[in-house]
Image (cartoon, coloured by chain):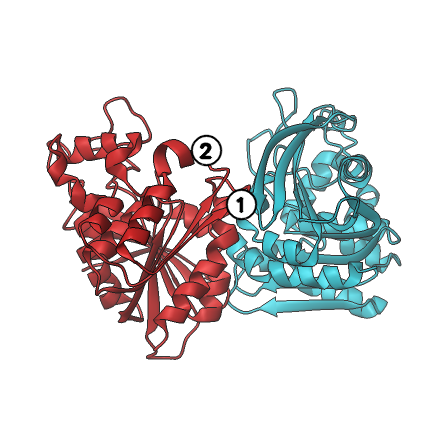
Chain colours: A red, B cyan
Amino acid sequence: MTLETLSTNKAYGGVQGVYRHQSRETGTAMTFAVFVPEHEPGERLPVLFYLSGLTCTHANVMEKGEYRAACAAEKIVFVAPDTSPRGEEVPDDAEGKYDFGLGAGFYVDATQPPFDRHYRMRSYVEQELPELIAAKFPVDMARQGITGHSMGGHGALTIALRNPSRFRSVSAFAPIVAPSQVPWGQKALAGYLGDDKSAWAEYDAVALIESGASLPNLLVDQGAADNFLEQELKTHLLEDACAKAGLDATIRMQPGYDHSYYFISTFMGEHVRWHAQRLRN
Amino acid sequence: MTLETLSTNKAYGGVQGVYRHQSRETGTAMTFAVFVPEHEPGERLPVLFYLSGLTCTHANVMEKGEYRAACAAEKIVFVAPDTSPRGEEVPDDAEGKYDFGLGAGFYVDATQPPFDRHYRMRSYVEQELPELIAAKFPVDMARQGITGHSMGGHGALTIALRNPSRFRSVSAFAPIVAPSQVPWGQKALAGYLGDDKSAWAEYDAVALIESGASLPNLLVDQGAADNFLEQELKTHLLEDACAKAGLDATIRMQPGYDHSYYFISTFMGEHVRWHAQRLRN
């Protein structure tokens, strides 16, 4: 487990770093960002994973997410991985569109060639990255939370639903909640997993909840002026599923907010504090 | 005074906008960013101008500056102009370097051809932009503050020193304090103003203070690990000049911080609140 440090910058008393390693899962170099707040020597802090949306790398939330103020105040380590494998050897969308292939890994382990070789973002985020974070950063893996935006909200929800004992807190910004039922998700799941929809269910938050999967808790913010709400996000499907299943979920429509980092950054501090409350010893 | 709206995004309850207009000073289209917090109909808010550093546009601080949280809480309008005229007709550095020409207007009115035609950033920021802001946004021009980073810190200091009654509050992040004495400034001032150094003094904060110019107050934060500190920024010259002149100045060295927006964003909230205290009715 060799970790290359690409950059570190002092921020809010802590260190914002960018790191790269050779991933066993994706077979590529993977880059991720970690913010470590100021802390005592030997102290181990709770960790919040943030999964990004379509087209993003680790850098978008690092530059625009405005999480460091709250993470420094609450002493939370913030981890932001990339959204797909990258490199010349990694196959991309046949038409070069933004919603499949590079920057659009959808947090699945692909089974369809040619994507199955490198697109292993589920195993990367569920297994390999946490092992690396646990080994190399001052974190307490008994206190993990997860969040994400859009495609990354889908990632956060599905990873948490499949690993109910791993996370103490789960949240999302404008998540894709039912990829099997929307164009972005249908294209991605068919492309990575094939046309047999039975293979899709474990990557569909609403389907997982309907099958009995559970979450410890859930906070979702969704902009009411989000251009993708009606066709791609369909937040009401998550509300319905959570209500039927009796899950502890707070799902809020935020009037006037769109899908951008202006929306995310507005509610980021509140999400970090919400996680912090649930990640205390 | 026609203003074109390029984008608006709701953020922290207010509106982050990007606007473009045809500038009479630069003879080009100029783009700037304005954040207007939520406010009562008819209410006019204090305004804080932020001048950016080398290579930046209006967008850098808008995306990475983390000012909206504090501006929303304190009800401050935040204005971020570009750092130079732009366009195919605008002459650039002969060698295409980052420290002169496009992105490097140094907030001067150039007198040397071919730069004198478009490089009129002093008059743009001192005269034209405030007129536009006063006419088009809900601001109280009796309550203005100014700040900036690096080259923009130089801009903020020199504009405030030349207009002592206009601003109630002045601050800077890692400013160039004595451009006549450092490589960045010597190149820019010679290129825009010619070799006669008597023309440089009104664009040199330390020289202005030594000539008796005054400021209402001053807050400066400077990263002690800033790579440009020793050769280009020379904060101690400002400390000496303020001390000799008996100015009300707080100049802080911040251990471990560099020249980046990770540094700026860390102290931005504090600067906004510092201005807000001085901009109250």
The Cα atoms of the two marked residues, 1 and 2, are separated by 21 Å
In the foreground, B254 or A123: A123
SS label for mark 2: loop
Q: Where residue A56 sits: x, y (%)?
A: 37, 41
Disc 2 marks which residue? Answer: A227
Q: Where residue B8 sits: x, y (%)?
A: 59, 36
Q: Within the image, what quadrant is residue A116 found in?
A: top left
Name the residue rendered at 25%, 27% in the picture. A93
Q: Chain of mark 1?
A: B
Q: Nearer the viewer, mark 1 or mark 2?
A: 2
Left-right relation of B42 to A68: right
Q: Is residue B100 visible?
A: no
Left-right relation of A207 to A38: left
Q: Is residue A256 visible?
A: yes
Q: Amino acid at mark 1?
A: Glu
Q: Which mark is residue A110?
A: none
Are there few (<14), some (14-19), or many (20+) residues within 10 Å of tag 2? few
Q: Where residue A120 sits: x, y (%)?
A: 17, 44
In the foreground, A98 or B233: A98
A178 to A94, vertically: above or below: below
Are there few (<14), some (14-19), or many (20+) residues within 10 Å of tag 1? some
Disc 1 marks which residue? Answer: B63
Name the residue rendered at 35%, 70% in the picture. A279
Q: Amino acid at mark 2?
A: Asn
A84 to B95, vertically: above or below: below
SS label for mark 1: helix
